[in-house]
Image (spheres, rainbow, N blue to C red):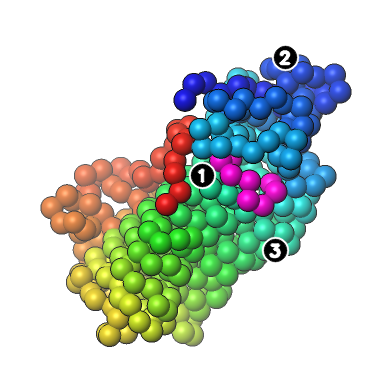
Amino acid sequence: MGARTNYFVDPTGGSDMMGNGSSGLPWASVQWALDNITRDSTNGDQINIKAGSDDTLTSALSVATYGTPSNSAPLVLRGFTSVADDRGVGGINCNEYAFLNAGTPATHVIDLRIHNPGSNLLWQGGNYCTAQSCEFDNGTGDCLYKIYLVENCHIHNFSGVGADVNHATGNYFVNGTYDFSICLDTRSTGSHFLRNIISVDGATRGISVSQDGAVLDANAILSSSGTGAGISLDFNREACMAVNNLIEGFSGTGGRGIDGNSMSEGWAVYGHNAAYNNATNYADDADVVNDLGDNESLGASPFAKSGSDTFANRATYFAAVDTGNVRGGGYPSGYNLDKGAVQSAGGSGSTTNVFIPAASGRFGVRES
């Protein structure tokens, strides 16, 4: 794959009528760009959206004129400040519309804040869609559905499901004015959720396993007296695995750390997790859940809780503390891994970092 063709949008300083999509004469809106680009069917196109003010939609973005992106020639929407790919954060105000017409494939969003879809599902993707280093917020419906990869994103203030996706890595979910029903749900067989941080309350469930073959590894889930569950293993699921997760605070009536009681057949394997201050830390159906062992019920919080519970401070707030077998007790043994989303240096050092990959511009991933 060669270099994508770059176009530029500046919602404040650009002009749809007078611009030409260059960095010197940008357009003012993404939809105008889509309607006036001659699609690069070989390498794809990148629309760069300048930080500073939002592009406010008047309807969901449409590729009807632009054409259908493909895995080899994707459509990329990315924020910038001065030059393309400089990690500036652009903005799209959905203005109570969906973000993009449902089912549009091979679309990648990077370094953007996309918000205010009203009661609409913010983004129903298609094959090969990804989101990297974005903020999605403020809707009374669901946020993301049928996205292949979501990484390093800040997702908050939705009333429905945060992300029903194939793969989720290093994301931060938090309740606000609106509470998620579920933060993360498995999109298809073989979904993989790694090192996500979830901070909720009320009846919100952290992760729901509703497809076979899910792997939930090293997620950090914190609730404030919640009545939901940190991880819910739903009925009829098979070959699921949950390891190295830290779950705290589902202490309200019926609250559960890992809930296997709703499984009616199939099996799940989980172990090397740690739970604290849940009404029930581990609720097993012995007929369908096989235990790897080392599921701890802790006597103290596994999280440092230093500073504020925010996206910017998440690596500090959710750092694993030295209680029980949290520090260095991760699976597989012998690698000195901490449980949870935040890894200390060598599993025992004084500094911490969260394993959240930066947006890498990697495209061409294939949906399983």
Disc 3 from disc 1: Cα separation: 26 Å
Q: Nearer the viewer, mark 3 or mark 1?
A: 1
Q: Nearer the viewer, mark 2 or mark 1?
A: 1
Question: From this viewpoint, which residue is outermost toward the left?
Answer: 334
Q: Amino acid at mark 1?
A: Tyr
182 lies above or below 217 = below
338 lies above or below 289 = above
Q: Is residue 116 left or right of residue 87?
A: right
Q: Amino acid at mark 2?
A: Gly
Say if mark 3 contacts mark 1, CB within 8 Å: no
> What residue is shown with label 1?
128
Residue 137 in view of the camera? no
Q: Which mark is residue 140?
A: 3
Residue 297 in view of the camera? yes
Residue 80, percent from left and from top: 61, 27
Total labels drawn = 3
Q: Which residues are magenta?
A: 100-107
Residue 74, percent from left and from top: 56, 34
Question: Residue placed at 36% from the left, 79% from the top?
Answer: 260
Depth check: give the residue in front, 355 or 36. 36
